[in-house]
Image: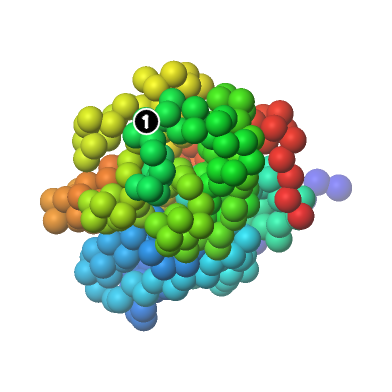
Amino acid sequence: MTTPRNSLRPVGRRVLLALAAAFCATSAFANSYPAKPVTLIVPFVAGGTTDIVGRILADGLGKELGQPVVVDNRGGAGGNIGASVVAQAVPDGYTLLLGYNGTNAINPSLYKKIPWDPVTSFAPISLVARVNNVVVVNPALPVKTLPELSSYAKAHPGQVSYGSAGAGSIFHLAGEMYAQLADLKITHVPYKGAAPALVDLMAGQTQFMISTIPAALPHIRSGKLRAIAVTGGQRSPLFPELPTALESGYPPMIVDSWFAVFAPGGVPEGLRTRLNQAIHKVLTNPEYTKRMEEQGAQPMPSSAAQLARLLNEDISSWRTIIRNAKVSLD
């Protein structure tokens, strides 16, 4: 029996009214957001680049949103612990993650088990910055260039070690890449973040490290560390005299870091837009642009879609690198 079209109208009308009410409620929520402080989870200990970039962003974002943005350092497991906190948080915009390519793009292929999915567990908000990396050595080491470091390591097999922000971090993998390219026998020493790794490097417990420029910058300026090369695609404006690893004779070694804001998956679209707009205002504000650049970070706001594409591309490319290197963590 055919159902009269008129009998569908009340049901359709109720559905439309319900959708309209939901849309209005979501819009009202987005317009009133935030009504309390926002927590920005930095998945590493204080003092590293993620923390430095996060605190600059939090300062400006708090002023744009009209509520404090509190940085909460949750270090451990290469950023997985902090990422898990955000993945499991209520998707109301009050808990955000300052992720970076090591945690969000590398860890999913590196760790056998992580309690979140890099794509579905998070809602991309905006890219924040890209940062060149720098190779630094203890000043007591008699090397001033990357080739000299290679020669020293070959003359002292098994006696040269390098620290990183954690096992499987982008800095660990960059070190492994360098060791393979230069055919070196060196030892990796993982830490729970860049800050403690740099402390041990300055104390002579390790001999060199690949670090982001913001984390190493004050120690380079104080003379406690010596910079010998950068690993980005081009030289850093802060150290124009330093050659890239490419210029030093290691062509495939181009490794930099990006940082971005993610919300828990399922956060309302209105909140994503609100946060994206606020982040863009911070990153185009001359005050915060200058603060970022002084730390060696290049402010780089993006759309959520651009961040999503970058994430997917990096997940794919690092998956291949990790598979070929046969690196895996529990």
Q: Residue 249: percent from the left, percent from the top?
A: 44, 18
Where is mark 1, residue-wise? 145
Q: Quadrant of residue 317?
A: top right
Q: From the viewer's perspective, is residue 203 above or below residue 300?
A: below
Residue lying farthest to the left in this orientation: 286
- Asked if residue 206 can be seen in this view, the reply is yes
Residue 271 is left or right of residue 55, and the answer is: right
Q: Residue 211: percent from the left, percent from the top?
A: 42, 47
Q: Residue 216: percent from the left, percent from the top?
A: 34, 52
Residue type (three-letter) at the residue carrying disc 1? Thr
Residue at image position (22%, 31%) is 240
Residue lying farthest to the right in this orientation: 1
Image coloring type: rainbow
- Disc 1 packing (10 Å; few <14; some 14–19; many ≥20): many
Residue at image position (57%, 24%) is 181
Residue at image position (22%, 40%) is 238
Residue 189 is left or right of residue 129, and the answer is: right
Residue at image position (53%, 47%) is 162
Residue lying farthest to the bottom in this orientation: 36
Could you tell me which secondary element the residue under label 1 belongs to? loop
Q: Nearer the viewer, residue 303 or 58?
A: 58
Q: Residue 12: percent from the left, percent from the top?
A: 61, 57
- Asked if residue 120 can be seen in this view, the reply is no
Q: Nearer the viewer, residue 165 or 82?
A: 165
Q: How many marks?
A: 1
Q: Which of the image's four quarters has the C terminus? A: bottom right
Q: Quadrant of residue 32?
A: bottom left
Residue 211 is left or right of residue 205, and the answer is: left
Q: Nearer the viewer, residue 224 or 310?
A: 224
Q: Nearer the viewer, residue 62 or 130?
A: 130
